[in-house]
Image (cartoon, rainbow, N blue to C red):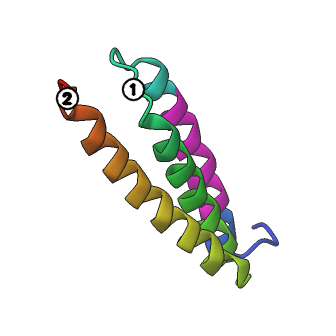
Amino acid sequence: MVKWPAAELFSILGGASTVVFYILFNRAAVVKRKSAYPRHVAFLALVTAIVLKSFGLSAGSYVMLVALVAVLVWFVWSVLEELPPSED
């Protein structure tokens, strides 16, 4: 039907639809936290890595590493954000 291979087509369509739903659900969130910034980076890096890997580009591996680091930063930041403030 189309001249694009299925893996690339589905990764682009899936990535675009996932980003749209992520934006819609994120705007509907009641609680806004500063730890969402690394979550946004992790999400976008993960989607980008999946699309790049479906095209067979080696840059997808490096972007996947960035996504992993962003997930770890997000996890630590969200845990630290939940701790009660210390009293001196």
The residue segment tinted magenta is: 10-23
> Is 12 located above or below residue 3 in the figure?
above
Crowding at mark 2 (Cα within 10 Å: few <14, some 14-19, many 20+) = few
Residue type marked 2? Ser
Give the mark nearest the N terminus, 1 or 2.
1
Crowding at mark 1 (Cα within 10 Å: few <14, some 14-19, many 20+) = few
Where is residue 57? Give x, y as percent.
74, 82
Residue wearing tag 2: 86
Q: Is residue 40 left or right of residue 61?
A: left
Q: Is residue 56 left or right of residue 81?
A: right
Where is residue 59? Give x, y as percent.
72, 78
Prevailing secondary structure of the magenta residues: helix
Give the quarter of the image for residue 65.
bottom right
Residue wearing tag 1: 33
Is residue 11 in the magenta section?
yes
Where is residue 81? Give x, y as percent.
30, 34
Q: Looking at the picture, tell me which residue is in the foreground, 36 or 18.
A: 36
Q: Please give the name of the residue rendered at 61% of the width and 63% of the height, measured from the top-left corner.
A: 11
Mark 2 element type: loop
Q: Is residue 16 left or right of residue 70?
A: right
